[in-house]
Image: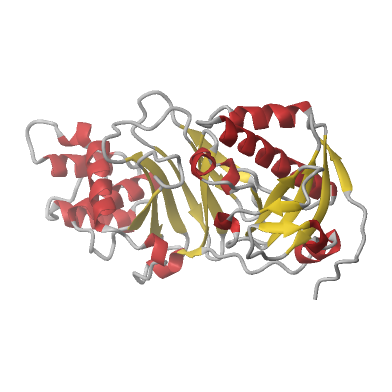
């Protein structure tokens, strides 16, 4: 039972010129004056809440919030803030000093662990955090139902849930997470990308182009290794031999990728899957490919590659692929240039290693976490 007589002091948080500039930028992207005002206030409510949580030492992630996605802002009345420690979204709803109730649209009644209410003054110099509720099922919530912020803080300091991660070693057993099931159309696209990746080498005149490419891979090894393809082996057998014997991880990966193109079911192939990022990156038809290839020493070769799909012939300019370690710190960042067909990053990992892959384009981003 809610105690409607409970009294508690609101917490005042200053709104900076930078906050107002950010809110104005988002508002200018809207088709109507009404939507512009709505987005302006929603953005300020999120920024006020974020600053309050920062003062308490609680991490937030604007880029992972739905309210920071331009497409979502265009079609929904949302003001959410992603809280990494809870792996969930906190809805930040604004109201004016004269409002006796806080409006909460139906589209945000679910997929939120709570709702914080912020009173915004005009001309938007300060926001007052009035209270918190854990769930709603009405479009207007009276002020008397706001609960103290202690309840929110208790939620934020609870033991975080186990982080959902993609189990890459399960891929070796052909067990994929539901959102990483290798769809046939994406795999066909990947095959096409690999063909184009090696196209200059495969178009040489004379001998069989596959045989020529295999010869190049053998010659690419260091001088203390065999530098020509064993004559008694066909190209597929020669690729398997190279994968199993070479000390050069780049040669090993290229050989495995070529073998995958010839026979995706071969046991020495890398395991490859992909995810369509179109719904995350403002409708751009892009794919994130993840490939894994075991080594004889128990380590694993990892390939992350972002490539265009459908009608796109090249990646958008300044698309970023960021790889983060288990603490969330980036250890690699690749950015697309003019006319790039793909961007990628390869590395070696041990069993139990965790990492995340983040793809960023303008204000939109996608992140997924993996463990070996």
Residue at horizontal 13%, vertical 31%? 204
Question: What is the total number of numbered labels drawn onto the structure image?
Answer: 0
Q: How is the image coloured?
A: secondary structure
The residue furthest top is 338
12 with respect to 123 (left or right): right
Q: Is residue 105 above or below residue 126?
A: below
Residue 222 appearing in the image? no
344 with respect to 108 (left or right): left
Q: Position of residue 252 (x, y in %)?
A: 34, 50
345 with respect to 333 (left or right): left
Residue at horizontal 85%, vertical 61%? 148
Residue 194 appearing in the image? yes
Corner quadrant of residue 331: top right
Residue at horizontal 16%, vertical 39%? 212
Decide which of 219, 34 is in the foreground and name it.
34
State which quarter of the image contains the N terminus: bottom right
134 with respect to 75 (left or right): right
Q: Position of residue 60 (x, y in %)?
A: 70, 49
Q: Position of residue 105 (x, y in %)?
A: 60, 53
Decide which of 139, 339 is in the foreground and name it.
139
Q: Is residue 364 above or below residue 184?
A: above
Q: Position of residue 82 (x, y in %)?
A: 64, 52
The residue furthest left is 206
Decide which of 318, 284 is in the foreground and name it.
284
Corner quadrant of residue 153: bottom right
Decide which of 246, 288 is in the foreground and name it.
288
The residue furthest bottom is 1
């Amino acid at each position: 039972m809610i105690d409607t007589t409970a009294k508690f002091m609101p917490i005042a948080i200053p709104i900076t010129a930078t906050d107002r500039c950010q809110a104005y930028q988002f508002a200018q992207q809207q088709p109507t004056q009404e939507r512009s005002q709505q987005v302006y206030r929603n953005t300020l409510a999120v920024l006020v809440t974020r600053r309050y949580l920062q003062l308490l030492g609680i991490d937030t992630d604007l880029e992972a919030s739905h309210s920071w996605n331009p497409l979502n802002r265009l079609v929904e009345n949302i003001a959410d803030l992603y809280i990494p420690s809870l792996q969930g979204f906190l809805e930040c709803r604004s109201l004016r000093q004269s409002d006796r109730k806080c409006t909460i649209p139906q589209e945000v009644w679910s997929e939120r662990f709570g709702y914080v209410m912020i009173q915004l003054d005009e001309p938007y110099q300060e926001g007052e955090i009035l209270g918190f509720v854990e769930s709603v099922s009405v479009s207007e919530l009276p002020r008397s139902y706001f609960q103290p912020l202690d309840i929110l803080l208790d939620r934020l300091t609870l033991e975080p849930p186990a982080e959902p991660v993609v189990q890459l070693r399960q891929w070796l057993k052909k067990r994929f997470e539901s959102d990483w099931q290798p769809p046939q159309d994406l795999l066909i696209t990947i095959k096409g990308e690999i063909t184009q990746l090696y196209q200059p080498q495969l178009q040489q005149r004379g001998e069989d182009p596959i045989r020529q490419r295999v010869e190049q891979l053998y010659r690419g090894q260091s001088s203390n290794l065999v530098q020509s393809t064993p004559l008694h082996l066909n190209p597929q057998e020669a690729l398997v031999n190279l994968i199993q014997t070479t000390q050069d991880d780049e040669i090993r990966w290229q050989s495995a990728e070529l073998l995958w193109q010839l026979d995706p079911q071969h046991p020495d192939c890398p395991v490859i899957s992909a995810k369509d990022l179109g719904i995350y990156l403002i409708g751009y038809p892009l794919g994130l490919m993840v490939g894994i290839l075991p080594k004889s020493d128990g380590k694993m070769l990892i390939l992350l590659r972002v490539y265009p799909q459908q009608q796109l012939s090249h990646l958008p300019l300044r698309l970023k692929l960021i790889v983060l370690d288990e603490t969330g710190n980036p250890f690699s960042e690749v950015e697309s240039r003019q006319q790039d067909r793909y961007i990628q990053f390869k590395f070696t990992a041990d069993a139990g290693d965790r990492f995340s892959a983040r793809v960023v384009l303008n204000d939109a981003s996608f992140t997924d976490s993996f463990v070996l």
